[in-house]
Amino acid sequence: MPRARRQTSAVITTLPVFKRLVILWITLIVISGAVLIWHSLWGISLLWGFSVCLVPAIVFARFAGQIRGAWGIRQSVNRFYSAESAKLILTAVLFAVVFTRDVAISIPVFLCAFVTAQIAQLIVTAASIRQRKGQPKAG
């Protein structure tokens, strides 16, 4: 009886991190919008802080979002490194944009928003991975 040949480029898993990070970013933008109405300087600072953290994370999740099997391990590793490089460069560019603009921001609020978004991103990613580990493997 002939055995079915396995597809070497088949995607084993795609973590839902990308969609969850986009939802987190939109939620934090809405919060920034509410604060923007109340106190414009803080609202702009929150918006930039959340965006500087989450936009590169979303780009990383999009580029490195697929884990391939053993046959595609080299491509998976290269994709991971490319995604991490893109995230690092985009983060540096966004920081440069924030600090070279003429519009005033509150640095403490900006940094608190950045750290808060970083922690929230780590929690969302960990929850996505933990949820994925609890699911049965595809045969």
Image: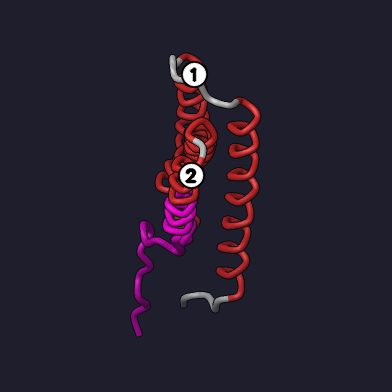
User: Which residue type carries mark 1?
Assistant: Ala
User: Which residue of the protein is positioned furthest toward the front in this rendering?
Assistant: 38
Instruction: Give residue 62's position: percent from left, percent from top.
Output: 40, 47
Residue at (63, 44) in percent of width and height:
116
Which residue bears the numbered disc 1? 96
Q: Give whichever of 37, 99 is nearer the camera.
A: 37
* Dot 1 and dot 2 residues touching (CB under 8 Å): no
Tell me how many marks there are.
2
Which range of residues does the magenta coloring cover? 1-28
Which residue bears the numbered disc 2? 32
Screen quadrant of the N terminus? bottom left
Q: Quadrant of residue 23?
A: bottom left
Instruction: Give residue 82's position: percent from left, percent from top.
Output: 45, 34
Residue at (55, 76) in percent of width and height:
135
User: Of callouts 1 and 2, which one flags the residue occurring earlier in the amino acid sequence?
Assistant: 2
Q: Give whichever of 41, 97 is nearer the camera.
A: 41
